Image: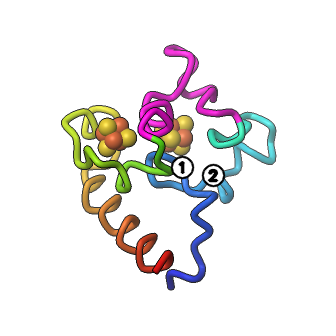
Amino acid sequence: MTETIDFTRITACGECCDGCGKKPSGACPGCIEADGRVPEWSGSGRCRVHACARDHDVLFCGLCAEFPCGRLPGFISWNPNIVEHQTNLARMYREKER
Ligand code: SF4
Ligand code: SF4
């Protein structure tokens, strides 16, 4: 299973933009490509999850030294299982890197 994940395509919040219909339609450039400057975060200018992950020099939150930090639930409020999701992603990433 881990071989099928291209971690260079995993977003800071632990998703993958590649299957999203907004990209081919031109509605969104993809947050990796746009360095977090996507329409959904136009109010704050840049995705706060993406910006925080890049500030911490990690691909996604599960790899962060501060994970699971107190900001995470607020940053990713749409996923109540975000800590579990990011923990699993980090485990798969580390297994692949071994
Ligand atoms: S919440 Fe942020 S990191 Fe997640 S997909 Fe959207 S722009 Fe990317
Ligand atoms: S775990 Fe917290 S501090 Fe680390 S990148 Fe994610 S939001 Fe930022």
> Which residue is most to the left?
70
Residue 77 can be seen, yes or no: no
In depth, the one of 48 and 66 nearer the eye is 66
Quadrant of the image where one finds ligand 2: top left
Q: Where in the figure is residue 13, as x and y percent of width and height?
A: 44, 47
Whether ligand 1 has any atom under 8 Å from the Cβ at mark 2 is answered as yes
Rate crowding at label 2 as few (under 14), some (14 to 19) or many (20 or more) other CA atoms within 10 Å.
some
The stretch drawn in magenta includes residue 33? no
The stretch drawn in magenta includes residue 44? yes
Task: Look at the numbered disc 2 and give the secondary structure of its residue.
Answer: helix
Q: Determine whether, in the image, residue 1 is placed left or right of residue 20.
A: left
Three-letter residue code for mark 2 = Cys
Three-letter residue code for mark 1 = Thr
Residue 8 can be seen, yes or no: yes
Relative to 22, is 71 above or below?
above
Mark 2 in CB contact with mark 1 (< 8 angstroms): yes
Task: Look at the numbered disc 1 and give the secondary structure of its residue.
Answer: loop
Q: Earlier in the sequence, mark 2 or mark 1?
A: 1
Magenta residues (range): 34-56
Residue 11, disc: 1
